Image (cartoon, rainbow, N blue to C red):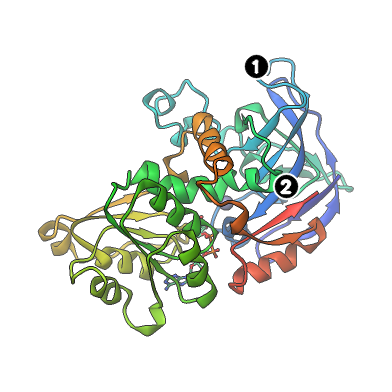
């Protein structure tokens, strides 16, 4: 099969013919229908995610089950699935406490050899998925069956960007109706977050992004105000829009420490900062500690939007089908597998909300 392989840091992405490994008893084979191009794929290429090499990139994916291992329960050939970034094993400390997004089995499904190159080298798959390929051989615990007639491109986005973004508003922060929200970073994840805040009933949603196109799209997705960080400090502009107070919830969706600080300073006294972006591995958060105490601000990380995939993916599919969440509007670019290098360039250039590779 054709697959996009990362060979190592700084090396170009290669579209290669590789041979899939046979599935084990707990594995399934999935024919990939659509795979989203996410900033985390770029983070992977840069070494932020500590991926083993060579590996098949891609992790935001929808497809159809074509083969099922002997011990797999609950999945059949022909099922539509969305790839999950976590296995939801249902048995670990976290899964038993309703925190399946922190499932302890997360590492056991990664780093497994899933294909061989023409010269026989072992190839793993990014986060146990490896979506930029015609097929995925994967642990069945990473597959979530969905009952939906939506186009695969829209379902794919649920697997990462929509869950991470909208989940951060709905499930990590539990944004309250009538509240004020700032979203710092309005790429694919930020736009999903804006929609999540809108669905939660936020009264004010302030979208912060240096790219005019991103600010424009934000307004379509439910933002009530926009801020250009090029026009002055983000926090000052956010405070100007909120009677000098700052917002109830400030979301960081870029992955830089400057924007974490911006979010911290944009939150009101007693407000909450939620970090969504992926930082570089050596980054440290440096914040004024007296404000932490005196202003009673809280700061919380959001992983995968705290999404409980077993039920959460279907919730998003239903919200999209009901016209309450616009997934189609997030897709601004479509690519073939061979266009991936260009897809990454265009994402970095700020032209893209979400690009999707279709097969
Ligand atoms: N203030 C606000 N926004 C900024 C700033 C800034 N100082 N600098 C950059 N941005 C914006 C970019 O213009 C872009 O629109 O942040 C956005 C990042 O979006 P994408 O590159 O599309 O990334 P996305 O896929 O949305 O992911 C965002 O979450 O999952 C993680 O790894 C991912 O850290 C990344 C973040
Ligand atoms: Zn992603």
At a point 41% along the width and 78% down the height, the residue shown is 228
Compare marks 1 and 2 and give the one earlier in the sequence.
2
Find the residue positioned furthest to the bottom: 231
| Residue 26 point in image, percent of width and height | 68, 22
Q: Is residue 317 above or below residue 335?
A: above
At a point 81% along the width and 45% down the height, the residue shown is 121
Q: Quadrant of residue 283?
A: bottom left
Q: Is residue 206 above or below residue 16?
A: below
Q: Is residue 80 above or below residue 271?
A: above
Residue 34 tag number: 2
Residue 264 tag number: none
Residue 1 is left or right of residue 40, and the answer is: right
Disc 1 and disc 2: Cα gap in Å? 24 Å
**169 or 9: which is nearer to us?**
169
Residue 73 tag number: 1
| Residue 40 point in image, percent of width and height | 57, 56
Q: Quadrant of residue 305?
A: top left
At a point 37% along the width and 46% down the height, the residue shown is 200
**84 or 197: which is nearer to us?**
197
Residue 145 is left or right of residue 175, and the answer is: right
């Amino acid at each position: 099969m054709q697959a996009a392989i990362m060979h190592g840091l700084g090396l170009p992405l290669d579209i290669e013919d590789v041979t899939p490994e046979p599935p084990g008893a707990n594995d399934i084979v999935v024919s990939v229908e659509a795979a989203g191009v996410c900033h985390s794929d770029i983070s992977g290429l840069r070494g932020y995610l500590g991926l083993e090499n060579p590996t098949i990139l891609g992790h935001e994916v929808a497809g159809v089950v074509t083969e099922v291992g002997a011990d797999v329960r609950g999945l059949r050939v022909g099922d539509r699935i969305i790839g999950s970034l976590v296995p939801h094993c249902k048995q670990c400390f976290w899964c038993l406490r309703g925190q399946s997004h922190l499932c302890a089995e997360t590492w056991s499904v990664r780093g497994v050899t899933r294909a061989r190159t023409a010269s026989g080298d072992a190839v793993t798959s990014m986060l146990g998925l490896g979506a930029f390929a015609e097929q995925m051989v994967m642990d069945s615990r990473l597959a979530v069956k969905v009952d939906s007639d939506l186009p695969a491109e829209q379902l794919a986005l649920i697997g990462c960007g929509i869950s991470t973004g909208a989940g951060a508003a709905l499930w990590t922060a539990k944004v309250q109706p009538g509240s004020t929200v700032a979203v710092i970073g309005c790429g694919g994840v930020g736009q999903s977050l804006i929609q999540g805040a809108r669905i939660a009933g936020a009264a004010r949603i302030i979208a912060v992004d240096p790219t005019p196109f991103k600010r424009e799209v934000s307004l379509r997705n439910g933002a009530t105000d926009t801020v250009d960080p090029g026009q002055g400090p983000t926090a000052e502009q956010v405070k100007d829009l909120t009677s000098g107070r700052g917002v109830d919830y400030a979301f960081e969706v870029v992955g830089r420490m400057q924007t974490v600080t911006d979010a911290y300073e944009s939150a009101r006294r007693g407000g909450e900062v939620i970090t969504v972006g992926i930082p570089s591995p050596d980054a440290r958060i440096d914040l004024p500690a007296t404000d932490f105490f005196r202003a009673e601000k809280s700061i919380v990380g959001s992983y995968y939007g705290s999404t409980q995939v077993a039920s959460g993916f279907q919730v998003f599919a239903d919200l999209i089908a009901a016209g309450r969440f616009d997934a189609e509007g997030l897709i601004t670019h479509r690519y073939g597998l061979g266009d991936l290098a260009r897809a990454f360039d265009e994402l970095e250039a700020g032209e893209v909300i979400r690009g999707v590779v279709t097969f």
